Amino acid sequence: MSFLSFIVLLAIAYLLWRVTDQLPDLIFRLSEIQRDIADIRRRMAGDGAPIEPSVTPSAGASAADDSTSAE
């Protein structure tokens, strides 16, 4: 029974070592996500414009297309 407990203790120690080994990367990624969210909120609160404007034809281009097709 003590051997089984020792194996379980080793498994827990290994898993803790793996988690703490990855912690700096995880913290960095979380800080990047927070920065992106702050930028999105700042843009939305600042000017109210969408972050990535959709591509739509301008009014002048569509009027020119309509006039050429009518001829």
Image (tube, grey):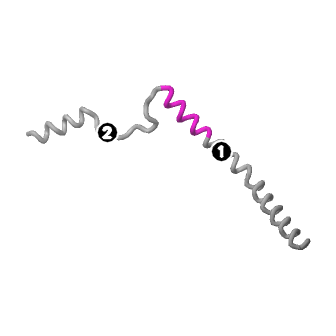
Assess disc 2: are there few (<14), some (14-19) or many (≥20) residues with their C-alpha within 10 Å of its C-alpha. few
Residue occupying image coordinates x 81% and y 66% = 11
Where's the C terminus, which quadrant? top left
**Relative to 27, residue 11 above or below:** below
The segment highlighted magenta reads 34-46
Determine which quarter of the picture holds residue 7: bottom right
Residue occupying image coordinates x 77% and y 56% = 21
The image shows residue 10 at horizontal and vertical percentages of 85, 66
Residue type at the position of mark 2? Thr
The image shows residue 44 at horizontal and vertical percentages of 49, 31
Q: State the residue lying farthest toward the left.
A: 71
Assess disc 1: are there few (<14), some (14-19) or many (≥20) residues with their C-alpha within 10 Å of its C-alpha. few
In terms of secondary structure, where does tag 1 sit? Answer: helix
Magenta stretch holds residue 42? yes
Q: Which residue matches tag 2? A: 56
- Sequence-first tag of 2 and 1: 1
Residue occupying image coordinates x 16% and y 38% = 66
Q: Which residue matches tag 1? A: 30
Determine which quarter of the picture holds residue 12: bottom right
